[in-house]
Amino acid sequence: MPQVATAASFRDFCGTVGARIGIIRRKYKVAPGIYAVGTPGSESPVLVTANYKLSFDALRLQLCGVDAWLLVLDTRGINVWCAAGKGTLSTEEVIRSVEHSRLALVVSHRELVLPQLAATGVTAQDVKRGCGFQVFFGPIRAADIPTYLQQGNQCNETMREVTFTLPERAVLIPVELFLLAKPLLITLALMFVLSGIGPSLFSLNAALHRGLTLLTATLLGIFGGAVLTPLLLPWLPCRQFWIKGVLAGLAAAVISWLLPAARYSLPEQLALFLWMITLSSYLAMNFTGSTPFTSPSGVEYEMRRGIPVQIAATCLTIVLWVGSPFF
Amino acid sequence: MHGYRYIEGTATLQVDLQRCVACGLCAEVCPHRIFALSAEGLEVKDYDLCMECGACARNCPVQAITVSPGVGCAAALLAPLVNRLLGRKVLSGCC
Ligand code: SF4
Ligand code: SF4
């Protein structure tokens, strides 16, 4: 049985940084199966988790001084919450893992402790029916596991409620930015072309000069939607994320006002402002996927309102920006 | 959840209290602490806090809860639309 450490190594640290930035996010997995923490015996508890390395690490690094078995499911390297929502962390997968790993030969009891958030994909009664093991839904955060075990599989109310604190929101920002790199490169070319169009058909000088301004505005829009929005989330007024994004984009636009934007003609300034706010609004709307409190029905509701506004604003931006040399 | 509320009146959560046998499983698994179990039975404290994760409905032994479950993610809802429009897979959603 592989033994796992309850302390992080330098390599773990590098891996965590890589996964958080997004470079190795999709490949950061551990092999599914049974692992030993401490010196577990046949009476020791079985803790179930996903095979995303960050989920696995979050659990094992909290288990200093605990003797337990870890049953790592094959969730294709996806974390507990997403895997449960997507169906890779399912009743069937739990039963399959229990049987495949021959857990019944390792422990004498018939109990599994699953993270509470796995309940979205796992039906406790069906696991019992399928493989004889009774499922206990443990705390949401791995840090509460030792207390949970000490209390005899009992959770306090706070252990069962999701949170979305400032540090929890801040760690999501690097991935949000990393995912934008590719679309940004594609739009970059388009922005320079649009910026060069003028009375003399196409001016390279204008393309570079105005293109750079448009790029700055784009970066500020991204700053509004993918940095300010997550950080200021609970304090931005309005429930709908696309409106929160408009407000965060306004803040970014004010920054641009202090930068060179003030030098441009009125239609150009208007275009830049609209673009920053629209981009921020769109990215803020996309941030719904990273929060633990937005319902799909609610997201659909706000998309029906936000997207038409965003499309109209983008069209107006292009007209103003391309048209301004002719005005 | 403290400090956060999403759009009112959109969640599809429905609880049939007539059917409920007050086992308390839904109250256990809900990450937003929406249910409270007392001597009088189950109480749904706040429908608007529901994020439609489906954990309660999946684990209710008597199917007293219905909710249309899913991930509340704009990218995930947008991806199939855009992909259908363009006729090929350009967006992959989230997670
Ligand atoms: S769907 Fe999820 S958030 Fe909504 S009541 Fe059920 S467990 Fe709670
Ligand atoms: S899980 Fe179903 S039966 Fe049990 S308390 Fe909730 S609604 Fe009632």
Image: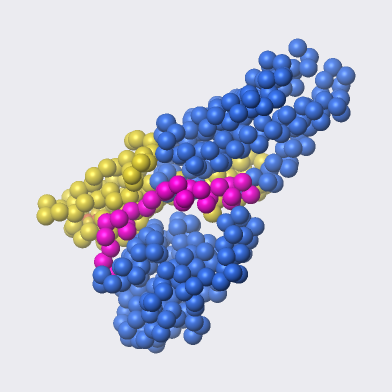
Chain colours: A blue, B yellow
- Residue at figure coordinates x 33%, y 44% from the top left: B2
- Residue at figure coordinates x 64%, y 27% from the top left: A256
Name which quarter of the figure residue B83 lies in: top right
Camera-side residue of A321 and A120: A321
- Quadrant in the picture for the C terminus of chain A: top right
Q: In the figure, A288 relative to A8: above or below?
A: above
- Residue at figure coordinates x 59%, y 69% from the top left: A10
Q: Is residue A180 left or right of residue A234?
A: right
- As drawn, the residue found furthest toward the front would be A258
Camera-side residue of A68 and A257: A257
Can residue A308 be found in the magenta stretch? no
Camera-side residue of B21 and B95: B95
- Residue at figure coordinates x 28%, y 72% from the top left: A150
Total marks in image = 0
Magenta region: which residues? A153-178
Can residue A123 be seen at all in this image of the molecule?
no
Q: In the figure, A274 relative to A159: above or below?
A: above
Position in image of residue A148 (x %, y %): 30, 68
